[in-house]
Image (cartoon, rainbow, N blue to C red):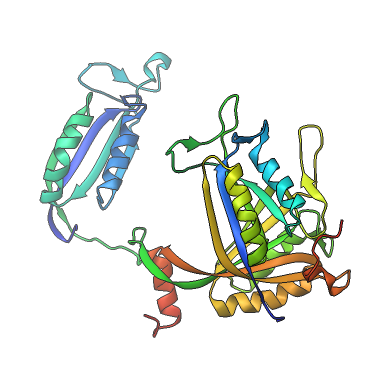
Amino acid sequence: MPALTPARILRLHFCEHDRYRDRPLHEAVVDKCRDMKIAGATVYRGVEGYGQTAEIHRSGVLASHHPIVVTVVDSAENIARLLPVVEEMMDKGLIAISDVEVIRIHKSGAAHAEQNPDRT
Amino acid sequence: MLAKGPAKKVTIYVNEDTRHHTGSLYEAILTFLLHKGVSGATATQALAGFGAHQVIHTPKIEELAEHPPIRIEFVETAGKVDELLPTLYDMVTDGLIEVQDTTVVKLATKEKKSEPKHPHVRKQGQARLMRIFLGEADKWHGEPLYDAIVQRLRMMDIDGATVYRGILGYGAKGHTHKQSFWHYSKDLPIMISVVDTTEKVAAAVGVLEEMIEDGLIVISDVEIVRLIHGHDLQEAANASPHAS
């Protein structure tokens, strides 16, 4: 088992219909993460849920109100850099951060992935 | 609890098509008796008969074949019958309830493997949460990698694993995984989440590292509150008698 690298995980909880400058907030957040060279971001759509507003999120007839979770794993510094930016983008919702340990598996290439995860 | 000796036998006569709310009455009565913990109840469909409506229900004449009589019988202690009767009285809107004294001569029950109703047991403690990030298109010997991982984790007796499919994302490889109405993606982001003890998660990491070509494993300490079915716990206790 290789050494575990300490890192942080950031989770953003909001609603699928939340928007940022006329586009879905989750898409805007992912693009922002990419611009800021954050290692990765994944968006999940929940089946059902409720949050702060106690409004049940589930699929409506016309609009989709599913709960959305955006997960970002990166170093503590990068998460700290990202946090104020996403905080500004979100009107309402929840941000949770926890400490994690990370193993990056990248067999086909060299070991440079750990330090420089952005290959594009 | 029913025992050998004096008891009460209750017989309820209803029609098969008598309704109770949206279901049939006899099914509702059986459900009620089961819910109340009655030792046993039997509903039998009569071949023919007549009741207070003075119409013979018989299969011999087609138009009288409807509304066949149903007889529900159960034997319980006098106390239990007293408890059940008011509700049954309300439920049977069309029919007859009869109670008679009886004597239970033998009551033999084969030992059950597991009791149906055990209370939930709460277990609390420290554990490790492992999240595995990979792509849906990743393969392992020709089958989807996430499938293979879940199977392997199950083989390792890992307590549980859940596979999530993301709707959008990018990772170290840099390409965006996205699906839209016009574009169907077969490579959406996949996350598998696993919660188990530190040792078992560490063992799983060793195996997963061999299976995953390109991906990320994220581990964190979590606190778990677990609700376990009583009989599962009993099985565990039987397996290791010293376990608390």
Residue toward you, A24 or A105: A24
Q: Please say whether residue B112 is visible from this viewpoint.
A: no
Is A118 situated above or below A55?
A: below
Q: Is residue B178 left or right of residue A93?
A: right
Residue A108, horizontal then vertical, whole percent: 88, 69
* Quarter of the rendering containing residue A23: top right
Residue B236, horizontal then vertical, whole percent: 44, 75
Q: Is residue A21 left or right of residue B235?
A: right
Residue B202, horizontal then vertical, whole percent: 63, 78
Point 67% across, 62% down: residue: A78
Point 16% across, 32% down: residue: B89
Residue toward you, B179 or A75: A75
Is A109 situated above or below B88?
A: below
Residue toward you, A70 or B38: A70
Residue B144, horizontal then vertical, whole percent: 78, 58
Quarter placement of the N terminus of chain A: bottom right
Residue toward you, A104 or A49: A104
Q: Please say whether residue B117 is visible from this viewpoint.
A: yes
Point 82% across, 55% down: residue: B174
Quarter placement of the C terminus of chain A: bottom right
Is B43 situated above or below B25?
A: below
* Quarter of the rendering containing residue A2: bottom right
